[in-house]
Image: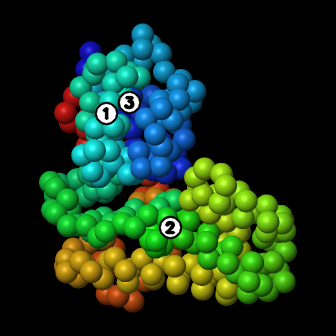
Amino acid sequence: MASLLLAESGSTKTDWCLVQKTGKTLHFKTSGINPYLQSSEQILSLLEHELSWNEEKHKTTSIAFYGAGASRLEQQKKLADVLKQFFGSKAIEVHCDMMAAARAMCGENRGIVCILGTGSNSCFYDGKKIKDRQTSLGYIAGDEGSGNYLGKRVLQYYAYHTFDEELMMCFEQLHGNDIGAILRRLYSEPFPNRYLATFVQLLKENRGHYMVENIIEDCLNDFFHAHLMKYRQSWNTPLYFTGSIAYEFKDVIGNLCHQYEIELGAIEKSPMDNLVKFHRKTL
């Protein structure tokens, strides 16, 4: 019986779905997999410790992996080799996370596709292929509008005493008041992008506060200005967003689309459900 194992991975988490021809699906979750940030050995160890996989119980004939950091052939080959080592010899294809978002959000239609999660990215999709995309500089020099970008702003507002007393107290309740400890964790431990994204919790819990709304709008506007304004198709093609940040602050995204006179197509938290529909046709 034909079955496909789908994986959609960001920098923080990976959603796995075993899609069977009968229509049945099984879902799994692991930490994020990013070949730019993790070695082959680290990725293999993650799969061995986090993915509850039983080859006899979860038989699969092919694997399609979509992931952050998998846009170049070198990284795609690295992931494919790890997957072959873990799952055995299967038909394996590896694509970047933008292709997952494009296929899930647009199907066979044109669109500007945006990912706003722990990181951020965008592309123009013609209904079959990614035809144009803005350069992604990652969490150190880019990722405008992402979770780690917003989190960095929250941390700055706290450390520089820009927040009012109410928000200063809220930050300390969530993360403590030891800046030294925060900096040690940020600069000494793995995945600082994930850690920065945890500071977004303060924004979620304090919607309506003018400082919070300013941070959200400014950071998302940076994404529009740095990326979406660079696509000539933005004014005649719908915009589609996916990711936890896009979904959490979809009201702000809607307002920005209105301000820039851009058509908003849809906003989804995760592309997985639509990605399953896209791939089920091939079983």
Q: Are marks 2 and 1 in contact (CB under 8 Å)?
A: no
The amino acid type of the residue labelled 3 equals: Val
Q: Which residue is mark 3?
A: 82
Q: Residues within 10 Å of mark 3 (few under 14, many from 20)?
A: some
Q: Residue at x 30, y 83 (%)?
A: 229
Q: Is residue 229 left or right of residue 49?
A: left
Label 2 vs label 1: CA separation? 27 Å
Label 3 vs label 2: CA separation? 27 Å
Among the 4 quarters of the image, the one containing residue 151: bottom right
Q: Which residue is mark 1?
A: 80
The quadrant of the picture occupied by the N terminus is: top left
Image location of residue 71, percent across then percent down: 29, 52
The amino acid type of the residue labelled 2 equals: Ile
Q: Residue at x 84, y 68 (%)?
A: 177
Label 3 vs label 1: CA separation? 5 Å
When the figure is inspected, residue 167 is found, relative to residue 199, above or below; the finding is below
Q: Which mark is residue 211?
A: none
Image location of residue 255, percent across then percent down: 45, 83
Q: Which mark is residue 140?
A: 2
